[in-house]
Image (spheres, helix red, strand yellow):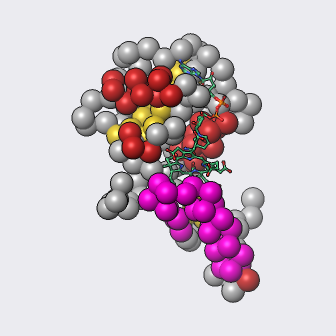
Amino acid sequence: MQNPYPVNLNLVNKSVVVVGGGKVAARKINSLLASNARVTVVSPQLDPKIDCLSVYWIRRKYRVGDLKNATLIIACTDDRQVNQQVVKDADQFQWVNNVSDKLQSDFYNVAKLENKELLITVSTKGRSPATSKKIKQYLLEWLTQNHYFREDRQ
Ligand SMILES: C[C@@]1(CC(=O)O)c2cc3[nH]c(cc4nc(cc5[nH]c(cc(n2)[C@H]1CCC(=O)O)[C@@](C)(CC(=O)O)[C@@H]5CCC(=O)O)C(CC(=O)O)=C4CCC(=O)O)c(CCC(=O)O)c3CC(=O)O
Ligand SMILES: NC(=O)C1=CN([C@@H]2O[C@H](COP(=O)(O)OP(=O)(O)OC[C@H]3O[C@@H](n4cnc5c(N)ncnc54)[C@H](O)[C@@H]3O)[C@@H](O)[C@H]2O)C=CC1
């Protein structure tokens, strides 16, 4: 993705289907839930970091038909072939992220810093997710030291 178009999505009441319920899924799902998306997870297992009461859990392996009504789709299993199948099954109006193959993704997730007033996102356009994470951490330090950023109190 050489020329991505950056946006912030309003996902309130939008349906997101996540195929796979492991560690990577947990990170993406917690972020989706924080944006009040309606999340369906298709997976035989669910990582303990996913709140099973906040998602609609279809407790089995992925099948054709599971993507119906999804606005966004995240193919997030540890099986590259299954992730590839999900990409194939999605229609042209759905947006798919394949976590194991950036060449098959319509969108990339970003590293983010967020509080009530501010949302800062970092992307390397798919080149190095670990670098995005590191830059985010440096930014957090700098912004906090200079009083531009304070994490929300609970
Ligand atoms: C293309 C993209 C698609 C997408 O997932 O949307 C993608 C793809 C891949 N990531 C891989 C690996 C890792 N990803 C992370 C972490 C994050 N990955 C995120 C985003 C993205 N990752 C998108 C591009 C982002 C950009 O443009 O910069 C972040 C920023 C946001 C989020 O996930 O929420 C989040 C940090 C959040 C935070 O902490 O702030 C870590 C580090 C860790 O887990 O601690 C590792 C292990 C270390 C390493 O390998 O670098 C692999 C190889 C998998 C394999 O080995 O098979 C692929 C597959 C590929 O590159 O094709
Ligand atoms: N994009 C990113 O940010 C990153 C992507 N990855 C990629 O993500 C993949 C997944 O990593 P983890 O979440 O750590 O793996 P994991 O092993 O924790 O989870 C895999 C999940 O997929 C489910 N699953 C397996 N087959 C399935 C099927 N047929 N249908 C539905 N669900 C199925 C399992 O039940 C499990 O919940 C890795 O293989 C790697 O390629 C890894 C790190 C970061």
Q: Main secondary structure of the magenta part?
A: helix
Q: Position of residue 24 (x, y in %)?
A: 62, 39
Residue 76 in magenta stretch: no
Q: Residue furthest bottom?
A: 146
> Which residue lies at the image location 49% right of the left edge and 57% below the top edge?
127
Nearer to me, 105 or 45: 105
Q: Residue furthest left?
A: 92
> Which residue lies at the image location 53% right of the left edge and 33% below the top edge?
76
Q: Position of residue 139 (x, y in %)?
A: 64, 74
Would you identify the image quadrant in which residue 65 lies?
A: top left
Instruction: Report whether 3 appears left or right of 49.
Output: left
Instruction: Report whether 82 appears left or right of 60.
Output: left
Q: Quadrant of the N terminus?
A: bottom left
Would you identify the image quadrant in which residue 138 lies?
A: bottom right
Q: Position of residue 114 (x, y in %)?
A: 60, 64
Visible residue check, residue 85 = yes
- Residue range of the region highlighted in magenta in the rendering: 120-144
Residue 124 in magenta stretch: yes
Q: Position of residue 88 (x, y in %)?
A: 33, 26
> Which residue lies at the image location 42% right of the left edge and 28% below the top edge?
84
Would you identify the image quadrant in which residue 28 lies?
A: top right
Numbered circles on residues, count: 0
- In this rendering, the answer to whether 104 lies above or below 43 is below
Instruction: Report whether 75 appears left or right of 47.
Output: left
Visible residue check, residue 41 = no
- In this rendering, the answer to whether 89 lies above or below 150 is above
Q: Quadrant of the C terminus?
A: bottom right
Instruction: Report whether 81 appears left or right of 137.
Output: left
